[in-house]
């Protein structure tokens, strides 16, 4: 019996302008400034582009750095959306992200997680926190 896979959508809204929130996504070097689960990012491109590869260094207490490989699979700058696959080949997550103007000002951001249910369930609370920080 294999691992049960599924999808889950999380989101957040805040006062940050959509273009600013998007720029925080578009530059991987900035991810650790708003995503507390990320200590650092190593990427072969300074800005999100389809095909970019790298690794996320997880901010977990560990004597060795936990590096998760990733590949950016799609980027739509005008639409402020992007997706990537992250993690080991045996249990990868596919994540789709977007930023939109929020009703009344500010921005809304969303994330759809696709992957093994145990991983999605464990990651969703961290993702919600990071999204709130992205748009504040």
Image (cartoon, rainbow, N blue to C red):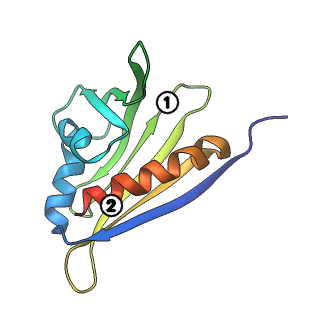
How packed mark 2 is, by other alpha carbons closer than 10 Å (few <14, some 14-19, many 20 or more), is: some
Horizontal and vertical percent for residue 10?
47, 62
The quadrant of the image that shows the N terminus is top right
Q: Which dot marks residue 36?
A: none
Q: Is residue 59 above or below residue 17?
A: above
Q: Nearer the viewer, residue 126 or 26?
A: 126
Which of the 4 quarters of the picture holds residue 134? bottom left
The kind of secondary structure element at disc 1 is loop
Residue bearing the label numbered 2: 132
Instruction: Give me the C-alpha separation between circle 2 and circle 1.
Output: 23 Å
At 18% across and 67% down in the image, what residue appears?
Answer: 16
Residue bearing the label numbered 1: 87
Q: Nearer the viewer, residue 27 or 53?
A: 27
At 37% across and 67% down in the image, what residue appears?
Answer: 12
The kind of secondary structure element at disc 2 is helix
Question: Among all residues in the image, which is located at the extreme right?
Answer: 1
């Amino acid at each position: 019996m294999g691992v049960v896979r599924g999808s889950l959508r999380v989101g957040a809204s805040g006062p940050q302008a959509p273009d600013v929130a998007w720029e925080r996504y578009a530059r991987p070097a900035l991810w650790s400034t708003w995503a507390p689960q990320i200590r650092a990012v190593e990427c072969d491109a300074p800005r999100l582009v389809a095909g970019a590869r790298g690794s996320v260094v997880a901010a977990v207490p560990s004597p060795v750095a936990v590096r998760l490989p990733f590949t950016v699979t799609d980027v739509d700058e005008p639409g402020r959306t992007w997706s990537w696959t992250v993690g080991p080949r045996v249990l990868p997550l596919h994540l789709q992200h977007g930023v939109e103007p929020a009703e009344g000002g500010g921005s809304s951001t969303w994330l759809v997680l696709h992957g093994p249910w145990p991983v999605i369930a464990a990651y969703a609370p961290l993702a919600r926190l990071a999204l709130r920080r992205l748009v504040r």
